[in-house]
Structure formats: C-alpha cells, structure tokens
Image (cartoon, grey):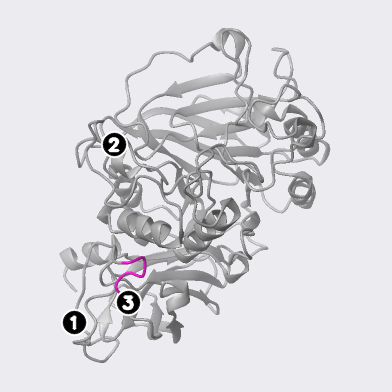
Amino acid sequence: MSKLNRRTFVFGTAVTVGAVALGGRASAALAYPFKLGVASGDPLPDGVVLWTRLAPDPLKNGNGGMPTTSTAVDWEVATDDKFANVVRNGRVTAVYADAHSVHVEVNGLQPDYEYYYRFRAEGHISPVGRTRTAPAFDTFGRDLLMAFTSCAHYEDGFYTVYRRMAEERPGLILHLGDYIYETSNKAEDPRPRRHADKAELVDLGDYRRRYAEYKMDSDLQAAHAAAPWLVVPDDHEVENNYAGDHRANDNPSLPNGWAKRREDAYKAYYENMPLRGGAKPNGHKIQLYRRVRWGRLATFHMLDTRQYRSDQACGDGWKYCPEAGDPARSLPGIAQENWLLDGFAQRQGTWDLIGQQVFFARRADANGASGMDGWDGYPASRDRIQKGWVQRGVRNPVVLTGDVHRAWANELKVDFTNPASPVVGTELVTSSVSSGGNGADTTGVPDQAGNPHLKFYSQHRGYVRAKLSQTKMDVDFRAVKKVTVRGEPVTTLRSYVVEEGRPGLQAP
C-alpha cells in the first residue's frame, strides 16, 4: 500500500478498495455501505469495541437506504495497516431493527498495543481504523497521549477540530457530549452549512438521519478512525437542557410523548457510538456511567450528569430552583455519587480522571450569582464528591468537562468562597468543536476577582491535549481561530503541568 493510501486509510477518508483482502465481490444490489466510516471505543487490556453502520444512502428514510433484511458483516483486526498479519476476525449480523449498526466486542488482543481494523459487507471494504488496547491492570504501560472535546453543532462550523485531533495520533479520545444537535438554527441566520432535515428532531428516524449527516463528515470520520473513543452524551443528543425526568421545553408536536422521544434519542445514540452491549438502552433509560481503567496509570470515571438529576426539594422547577443548596439535590443522582466514591476508594490508578459534561468549579458572575445548569446548582452534591476524594486519599483527581463552548482551566477547592482554602483537584474544560461559530481573542478570566480559582479562559474552538505519565500531566489547550472556513491550523493557547501528588495548575 502506498504512503498516500496508508494515510488515507488510517484517517478514515477512503471510500472503498478492491475486495481482494477479505474476499468476495461487491454486490451489484447494494451500493457502497460504509459511508459513515468506522470507529472503536471502550478499550480493555485484551480488547476493544469495533463499530460501523451500513448506510448506502445515509439520509434516506432513517434506515440509511438499507433493505429490511439482515446483512452479514465480516471484520478483522491486524497488527499492520496492510493486514498482512491478521490476529482476529469474525462475522456478525447487522439487522434492520438496529439500523444495521455493528458493535463487535473483540477480545484476545495484547495489552497496550496498536491495531488496525476493517469490515466487509456484500463484497465492499470499509475504511481502515487504528485502535489501541489499554495496558494490563497491573502495569503502567506507556505514557498516554489523549485528547478530549465536546459540542459539535454541524451548522455552526466545519469540523477542523476533529481533523487536528486525528493528526495528533492520540492513544485515546474522549467526547463529552453534544455530539449532535437536535434543533437547527433559524433559516435567516447566516451559517456555513445547514442541516438537511427538519428544524427539530422528534422521533427515531429523525435522530438516525441526524447522526448519519454528522458522520458523513470526513473530519469526524478521521478522528474516529485515529483512536479509540470514550463517549458520554449531554443534553442535545436528546433535547436542549433536559435533566432527569424534567423537560426544558414544551413541544406539543411530539407524536408519542416525551418518554418515547427520549427512548428514540438514546436508541439512535447507542446505534451510532462504539459502546459495549451493556449500554444498549432499556426503554428510555441507558446505562452510560462506567469506569475504564488504563492500567495503573489512570482510571477514567465517565459520568452521566443528565439522566439522574434529583430535585426532590424543587418540585417541577429543575432549572431555577431557589433551594439549590438543599442536600437532597444531586446532579448525578445519589446512586451514581456512591458509585463514584466507591471508585475513588479503590485508588487503582495514579490519575483519577472524571469525564463529565457540565462546569464543575464555582463560577459566580459579577453579582455573585451562579448558573444552575451545572454543579453550581448542586453545591452539596459537589461538596460530597470533593470531600469524598480527599477522605479516600485520591492524590490526583482531574475533572474533564465539556458543555460551555469555552476553554477553562480551574483549580478546585472544597470551599470556593475562601481564597485560603487548599487546592484539592483540577478541572480542565474543553472548548467546542464548532458550537458557537468562530471564537474571539480574549484577555483575562471573566469576573476573576470573585473566582480566583479560575486560571484560564478562551473563546476559541478547540480541544484539550494531555500527556499522562507517572509523574505529571502535560496539558495543552489547542484551538483553531475559525470554523466557518475549512482547514485552519491549530495552535496552543496555553500550557500547564499537573504534578503527581500536587493538585492544581503549574507552569510548564
């Protein structure tokens, strides 16, 4: 395979190749079905999830142009991108009821090892993806280069951020929510591109088409093909600002009610993400909070901050509850809080990384008021978690956050109102992929006088790159200046070091 073809395959932009390697001829009855690319996720020391979805006509009727019959899909994993050394292979069946999506849970692989994978269906060959297994649980393994981002409104800009992340060749990518957006911008608002579908998604076909539209983007495909992903949704995968069983909007056009819309949204999410079978939705519920160990180097505690919010003290007013300090309120729900604290007590990795969606640190405006759609609305819940990691001897807690379309670097204190309170953790907040459109140059942190723990702020679109070792975490806030044009270069806006055993942000 030539150097050009190798790069094309690895970064997921190839359309097809000859059907020689996996055998068979392309079916005359089925057009090329891998237009949504490939992905991998949730790595273990001996395996990983491989994903694809067959869709020869991605935006057609919510089924991608596939027939109602099932289709056999072959897969293979190799140690090289030419597939000269295939180490695992098999066949699965893609079914109509699951939008012909495929989730292969491969095992029997070597720990802390790089692999390549691909699929075949009806004689057509998929693009090639690169993935990596986690280190063995009792070893540190190699240093880990990871990247994380969130919030990718298709209409607000191009996905250059995904392309630049792929070019980093990270060992792991985290996506912290708002992978799709369920609504469209107003027709009169100038935007670089437009959703092909209706203004607001309400049923399963709508959500499937929206995922297909996003996944047809070559830059997004490149990021999926470059590394395994850990994913959690936020609100826009269902409905803007939804939380728990409460809805932010009253949409009378829902054909079968709110619970059915949520069920459809989560079904489409699972169909389109590289998740294990345990995450397959049960009605309108989906099990997404989970722990992923990266050997003895790190433990990723992936949270769900939308489904389980408990606002018993607030009645129906979940968003602007005047009793935000009531200890009965929990943003992740009490069961998930306890699960997280139990994970802290295990102290299985040098770094405890909490992948979650909404702003964790206190962020008061000039009048001292805090936002409610984040941990500021649940201070007792946040306090239990922070005190919990201190009491359990967690040396290196780092919260990884999305949602706010801005980059922030924050030092975490048990008492945010006391400047003398010791730093007990670190929060890194990624900017968005495209949501909010082009960013802007900024100087200083808004209202820093009332928030001395907030150390860095940027409005540019981008991602956070972090290299984890046994002694430190090197952090770079990476950004592109424009997303309304394709192909912008990426620059580093600010760098920090988080030292092992020393919470907070240090100069590199």
- Up-down relation of residue 224 to residue 384 (above or below): below
**Between marks 3 and 1, how big is the CA–CA gap?**
22 Å
Q: Which residue is mark 1?
A: 18
Q: Residue at x 56, y 37 (%)?
A: 248
Q: Which residue is mark 2?
A: 490
Q: Nearer the viewer, residue 188 or 104?
A: 188
Q: Which numbered tag is attached to residue 212? A: none
Q: Secondary structure at mark 3?
A: loop
**Between marks 2 and 3, how big is the CA–CA gap?**
38 Å
Sequence-earlier tag: 3 or 1 = 1
Q: Amino acid at mark 2?
A: Val
Secondary structure mostly taken by the magenta-highlighted segment of the chain: loop
Q: Amino acid at mark 3?
A: Met
Q: Which numbered tag is attached to residue 66? A: 3
Q: Which residues are magenta?
A: 61-66
Disc number lying in front (3 or 1): 3
Q: Amino acid at mark 1?
A: Gly
**Between marks 2 and 1, how big is the CA–CA gap?**
35 Å
Q: Nearer the viewer, residue 204 or 482?
A: 204
- The quarter of the displayed image where residue 228 is located: bottom left
Task: Report crowding for label 3: few under 14, some 14 to 19, many 20 or more residues within 10 A (C-alpha).
Answer: many
Q: Is residue 226 visible?
A: no
In the picture provided, is 292 more to the left or to the right than 91? Answer: right
Task: Report crowding for label 1: few under 14, some 14 to 19, many 20 or more residues within 10 A (C-alpha).
Answer: few
Sequence-earlier tag: 2 or 3 = 3
Say which quadrant the N terminus sits in.
bottom left
